[in-house]
Each structure stands twice: as C-alpha cells, then as structure tokens.
Image: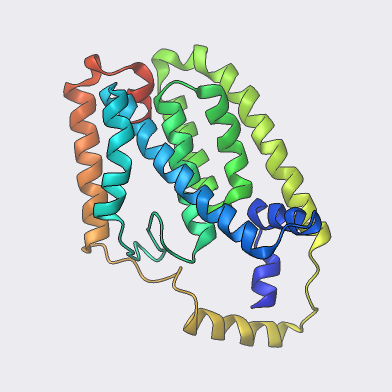
C-alpha cells in the first residue's frame, strides 16, 4: 500500500507535504481537504444551476438541498461516484474539481476554466484527462465560435498544463519506492487487483449507470435542440 500511495500522482499529496513541512498537523490538513471538497461541490452545482436558470437565489439554495437528498455512494462503472461524506478524498475532490471547472465554462469564465482544466491533470490524472478530451472535442466542434475561442483556450490551457507538468516532474523525482523484482511486483499487483481494486470492475452495459448516462445525453440533446436560443452561449457549450 505504501508503494501504491507513493506512486499515486496528485497535487493534493504534494500540497499536504508542503503543509506538513510548514508545521500544520495532519488533522488540520484533513479538515482543510474535507472542506475543500464541500466548497468545490457546492460551488460547482451553483455555477451550473445559475448558468441554466440565471437565478442567483435558486442557484444558491439548490446545491445543499440536492446534496442532502441525492448524496449516495454508488460504484458507477468501477469508480465511486459520490459528492461528500466519504474517505475517498482523491476521487471526491477530483470529481468536484472538474464539475467546478465545467461550471466556470457555463458562466463564461473561460480563462480560469481553461487554466484549471489544464491543472486538473495534477489534481486527478484520469478524471482530468477525460475532462480535457471532452472539452477539446466540444471546442473544436463548435465551428461558429472556434476562431474566437481557440486562441484563448490554447493560451490558458498551456499555463495549466505547465503547472501539471511541474507537479509530475516533482512527483517522479521526489517520491522513491522500494525496488522489487518483476516476479514479486507481479505477485503483489495481481493480489491488489483481485482483492482491493474496484476501479477495474466489468461494465454492465444494461445497468443503471449506463441508463443514467443515456438519460442525461437525451435530456441534454433535447435542451440543445429546443432551448438553445434561450440559453447563453456558454451554457450551451457545456451542454
């Protein structure tokens, strides 16, 4: 487990190391990240809702009610999908962070959104990678606004990518793990995959998770087809 934690690249661990070096206790840093997960989750929900409703009061009141009612722990395709109230800090903050980034896009703060999208690779590499792939596909397929949006996207995303690259270099150069023979490493890896790792569960294409994605895509498509003219351009981009 030490090897697993040492090889896991995330700026969250590096930030924690800086905090410990500065004298902050582990409990203080744990409370900080717990609070950060809540801040990102609530802010992300509020930004999305404001972008679609343009109602400040509704946007501020809805997130706590939604999280209170629907905050459940489910396993998705093979990864925990939850908002708050779990020990899976990397996953919760990672998903809250990308949701917050999408919220920034939805309200038109594209400079910060592209910068943080680039940084998301250092927050949670796999979630950040998927976020960037989807964002670039969405941007490049928006032919009407491509010439206006592309220079800004390249400029600020490169800043975020540079920050993520700096974090990765620090990770590779600073965290050393014990040397293991190939046979020993294979034995431990197989034991971990068989008994501990739920991230690689088989996908049930007829399960509730696929159905929820299908419903979400359907609702988004209907909204774009029939409500596009009444929504701001940034809100339609994120849909």
Residue 8 sits above or below residue 125 on the image:
below
Residue placed most toward the observer, 220 or 25: 25
Image coordinates for residue 43, horizontal then vertical, percent: 43, 37
In the picture, measured across the screen, residue 173 lies left or right of residue 116, that is right
Q: Residue furthest right?
A: 173
Residue placed most toward the observer, 109 or 217: 109
User: Quadrant location of the C terminus?
Assistant: top left
Count how many numbered circles sit on residues in the image.
0
Task: Identify which residue is drawn at 69% across, 56% down.
Answer: 16
Task: Identify which residue is drawn at 26% across, 25% down.
Answer: 53
In the picture, measured across the screen, residue 177 lies left or right of residue 150, that is right
Image coordinates for residue 217, horizontal then vertical, percent: 25, 41
Residue 20 sits above or below residue 194 on the image:
above
Residue placed most toward the observer, 20 or 160: 20
Image coordinates for residue 21, horizontal then vertical, percent: 80, 57
In the picture, measured across the screen, residue 182 lies left or right of residue 100, that is right
User: In terms of image quadrants, where is residue 79?
Assistant: bottom left
Task: Identify which residue is drawn at 65% across, 69% down.
Answer: 5
User: Quadrant location of the N terminus?
Assistant: bottom right
Residue 158 sits above or below residue 178 on the image:
above
Image coordinates for residue 100, horizontal then vertical, percent: 46, 38
Task: Identify which residue is drawn at 33% across, 66% down.
Answer: 203
């Amino acid at each position: 487990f030490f090897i697993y934690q040492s090889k896991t690249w995330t700026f969250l661990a590096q930030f924690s190391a800086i905090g410990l070096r500065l004298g902050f206790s582990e409990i203080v840093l744990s409370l900080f990240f717990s609070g950060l997960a809540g801040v990102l989750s609530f802010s992300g929900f509020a930004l999305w809702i404001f972008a679609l409703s343009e109602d400040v009061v509704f946007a501020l009141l809805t997130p706590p009610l939604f999280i209170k009612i629907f905050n459940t722990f489910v396993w998705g395709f093979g990864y925990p999908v939850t908002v708050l109230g779990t020990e899976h800090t990397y996953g919760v903050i990672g998903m809250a962070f990308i949701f917050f980034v999408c919220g920034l896009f939805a309200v038109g703060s594209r400079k910060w959104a592209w910068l943080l999208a680039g940084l998301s690779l250092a927050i949670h590499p796999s979630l950040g990678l998927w976020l960037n792939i989807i964002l670039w596909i969405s941007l490049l397929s928006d032919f009407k606004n491509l010439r206006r949006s592309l220079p800004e996207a390249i400029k600020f995303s490169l800043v975020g990518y540079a920050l993520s690259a700096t974090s990765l270099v620090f990770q590779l150069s600073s965290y050393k793990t014990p040397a293991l023979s190939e046979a020993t490493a294979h034995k431990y890896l197989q034991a971990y995959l068989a008994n501990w790792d739920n991230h690689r569960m088989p996908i049930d294409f007829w399960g509730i998770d696929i159905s929820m994605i299908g419903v979400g895509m359907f609702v988004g498509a209907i909204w774009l087809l029939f409500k596009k003219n009444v929504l701001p351009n940034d809100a339609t981009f994120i849909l």
